[in-house]
Image (spheres, helix red, strand yellow):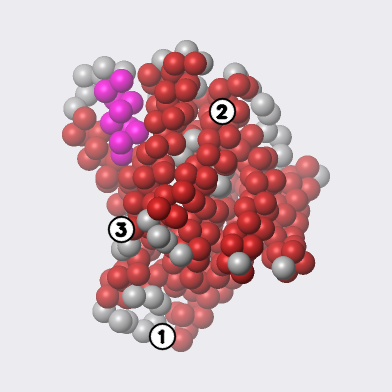
């Protein structure tokens, strides 16, 4: 069992390490990383999600029990982090909201898809797609509205919500999910040429995304209040997956569903957390450090969770 896990997890960390080494040696620079990231975001991730979702029944994607398990845990984790940081660490309301957002927003696209695909295959990707299809919208929208209200801006919250929804509708990942749902609902079969095209993009996605993660880690520095960042990173990588596991057991979900959900919860924060902090000029250094610390912690936590989930699946 352990040797099989090593065979599965080994390539993940070798690819991350290869990306780090390429950046360290100056063989891949900031412009190349930015270009490859855009290619992954606009082509590889949408193709992977489209092929995964369109080949399954729509009823399997819209699973309210999975949403309740994952997003119930997300809400509880966010409240714990917010109260801890505002009461104990004396952060103000705006800082608490931004930092709590960093403790719940997972890097599902760039890091989650390759990890879940390698560990759980198509069944795991379906769970991932179920969580991902409302991930950005359900977390970004309330966070933006809370930030607007906490800062007592005179702007219309309805306009803020409309702008957020408009941005999500234009998101290529959301577009791919919607198109895939339509294709699955109509039971459309893709022509062989198109299906092969998507398959090739899907196979290219894991190595490119994982190497970009490694390249992105190089040159990052720890900044800001380390205690605050450590609390956020611990909540993201350890607390959230633990609560997802508990909720999953209470709701009676099988380990084949709980397992991928736990791994998704344990992923480090995505770049949207830093963008949120930057756009509001609030806790930028602490948010960036939270993402870096959580990424480093996940290198240890994810293999341990993989061992635990494998044990539970075979017990």
Q: What span is in magenta?
A: 141-150
User: Closer to the camera, 22 or 49?
Assistant: 49
Q: Crowdedness of circle 2 by 10 Å Cα count: few (<14), some, many (20+)?
A: many
In the rendered image, residue 242, in percent from the top left (x then y), is placed at: 52, 45
Pointer 1: what residue?
A: 191
The disc at residue 91 is none
Quick one: which residue is furthest to the top in this view?
Answer: 90
Q: In this view, does 255 lie above or below 112?
A: below
In the rendered image, residue 275, in percent from the top left (x then y), is placed at: 46, 34
Q: How far apart are marks 2 and 1 (CA)?
A: 50 Å
In the rendered image, residue 141, in percent from the top left (x then y), is placed at: 31, 39
Pointer 2: what residue?
A: 231
Disc tally is 3
Please identify the quadrant where the C terminus is shown. Answer: bottom right
| Res 289 → quadrant | top right
Q: Is the magenta stretch mostly helix, strand or loop?
A: helix
């Amino acid at each position: 069992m352990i040797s099989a896990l090593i065979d599965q997890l080994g390539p993940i960390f070798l690819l991350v390490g290869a990306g780090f080494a390429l950046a360290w040696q100056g063989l891949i620079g900031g412009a190349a990383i930015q270009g490859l990231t855009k290619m992954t975001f606009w082509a590889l991730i949408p193709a992977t999600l489209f092929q995964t979702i369109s080949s399954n029944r729509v009823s399997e994607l819209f699973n309210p029990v999975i949403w309740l398990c994952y997003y119930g845990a997300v809400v509880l984790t966010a409240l714990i982090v917010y109260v801890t940081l505002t009461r104990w660490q004396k952060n103000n309301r705006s800082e608490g909201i931004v930092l709590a957002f960093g403790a719940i927003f997972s890097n599902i696209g760039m890091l989650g898809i390759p990890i879940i695909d390698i560990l759980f295959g198509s069944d795991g990707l379906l769970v991932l797609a179920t969580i991902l299809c409302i991930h950005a919208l359900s977390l970004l929208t309330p966070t933006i509205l809370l930030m607007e209200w906490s800062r007592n801006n005179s702007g219309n919250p309805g306009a803020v919500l409309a702008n957020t929804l408009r941005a999500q509708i234009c998101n290529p990942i959301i577009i791919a999910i919607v198109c895939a749902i339509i294709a699955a609902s109509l039971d459309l079969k893709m022509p062989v040429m198109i299906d092969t095209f998507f398959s090739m993009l899907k196979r290219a996605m894991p190595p490119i995304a994982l190497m970009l993660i490694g390249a992105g880690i190089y040159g990052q520095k720890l900044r800001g209040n380390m205690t605050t960042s450590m609390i956020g990173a611990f909540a993201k990588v350890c607390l959230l997956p633990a609560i997802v596991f508990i909720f999953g057991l209470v709701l009676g979900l099988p380990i084949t569903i709980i397992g991928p959900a736990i791994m998704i919860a344990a992923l480090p924060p995505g770049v949207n957390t830093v963008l949120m902090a930057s756009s509001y000029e609030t806790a930028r250094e602490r948010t960036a450090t939270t993402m870096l610390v959580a990424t480093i912690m996940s290198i240890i936590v994810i293999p341990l969770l993989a061992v635990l989930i494998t044990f539970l699946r075979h017990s």
